[in-house]
Amino acid sequence: MTPHPAPDARVLVINSGSSSLKFQLLAPATGHVDASGIVERIGLPTGSARIEAGDREAAVDGEVPDHVEAMRVVERLFSEVGISLDEDRVLAVGHRVVQGGARFSEPTLIDSWVRGQIHDLGALAPLHNYAAVDGIDGARALLPKVPHVAVFDTAFFTGLPARSANYALNREIAEEYRIRRYGAHGTSHRYVSQAVAAMMAGRGRTPESLRQIVLHLGNGASVSAIDGGEPIDTSMGLTPLEGLVMGTRTGDIDPSVYLHLHRQGNLSPAEVDTILNKRSGMLGMCGMSDFRDIETAIEAGDEQAELAMEVYIHRLRKYIGSYAFALGGLDAVTFTAGIGENAATVRALALAGLEEFGIVLDAEANAARGKEARVISAPSSRVTVLVVPTNEELAIAQQAAEVAARRRSR
């Protein structure tokens, strides 16, 4: 049995981007957050960093040439708010890593081999994995005696059935270039689906019998179909571009669009990639990606914003319907992440008119705001509809703590 972390034990969670490093120090046993912050503009002439720790705040400005220096800045920020990153108190450092390929299905203790594998998998996620390696190097330099654990966004989906994981692509090509559906947001989908199972257990449903759809709707968005706690499908594929319409990404699109833009527009592959990933989605259709702005624009009669919302909802409903069929029935639909948790209009539109399929929203419950997990379906609804706030940092901290505890107990 894995020892539980002590209540005063802490995990430092690191989420590294190419020019940023987010961090959070929290208790995996309780979820209490001691401090959180971000270092921005890494590698640029002028960097900045800030931290919040309860009612204490601190900020620093200055050049941050790399992630090693970024971690020294993090240590300085903690010192300025009176918190020591003492190695006796920090149980582990948990690193969010986007792409684990088919190799990593569980949180993994980082050694030189694992670090090398994460770097190698950067070929599948160049915008994310290389930055994660930089963050790992910086954090290990700062805390060399503490276990460092990689928690992979793709891990939850490594066990997808072959029918869901494979593209109908030439087999030799797929194998040579490691092309398959890896998914993303797995840490969130795992955390939320387990929370739903616990809530539904109080309603007499066993986790083994639960068929659920989880909608992670943020600037990046994905949906998963989960049967008895195991994912059977997810919307993101080789990369996070596939699937739902997102803040700046197209989601599902005819792949020949790449060739069309290249041939007809004389655009380079890099230019096309930028268009599909950063200049499309809601931003590309109506000039906005924040749903609060989009809803305001719709109320003011903005036809482009209205069409963008219709496209967004149409794609969402297509996935809900197809996943309900793939599951052979449906017991729960859950909304999470920034849009899923806060945009009542999106939830209402996504499930409107589905009463014949056993989905009935409680309009008042849906409109009510709150930070707690809650049911928003009517008592008459055969399918339970929920809003469950995701907490990827806590999930990473708990998984990192488990790996560190197993290591210490050997």
Image (tube, rainbow, N blue to C red):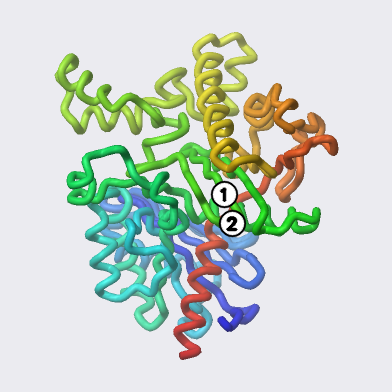
Residue at the image point whose x is 51% and y is 71% from the top:
11
Q: Is residue 312 left or right of residue 204?
A: left
**Quarter assignment of residue 259:** top left
> Can you name the residue that lies furthest to the bottom here?
410
Residue 322 location, quadrant: top right
Taking the image as shown, residue 166 lies to the left or right of residue 173, namely right
Question: Image quadrant for the N terminus?
Answer: bottom right
Secondary structure under badge 1? strand
Q: Nearer the viewer, residue 181 or 185?
A: 181
Asked whether the viewer can see residue 305, the reply is yes
Q: Kindly identify the amino acid type of the residue bearing the numbered disc 2.
A: Gly
The image quarter in which residue 228 lies: bottom right
Q: Name the residue rendered at 38%, 47% in the picture.
A: 165
| The disc label shown at residue 226, or none | 1
Residue 278 image offset from top left, x and y in percent: 35, 32
- The circle drawn on residue 43 is none
Q: Residue at x 72, y 50 (%)?
A: 373
Marks 2/1 in contact by CB < 8 Å: the verdict is: yes
User: Mark 2 = which residue?
Assistant: 229
Q: Position of residue 218 (x, y in %)?
A: 52, 39
Instruction: Work out how far the residue at label 2 is from the one at label 1, CA to CA, in angstroms.
Output: 6 Å
Q: Measured along the vertical axis of the image, is residue 55 above or below residue 125? A: below
The image shows residue 362, relative to residue 122, as above or below, that is above
**Where in the figure is residue 392, as x and y percent of width and height?**
53, 56
Q: Position of residue 196 (x, y in %)?
A: 68, 53
Crowd tier of the residue under label 2, counting other residues whose Cα lies within 10 Å: few below 14, some 14–19, many 20 or above: some
Q: Which amino acid type is shown beneath numbered disc 1?
A: Ile
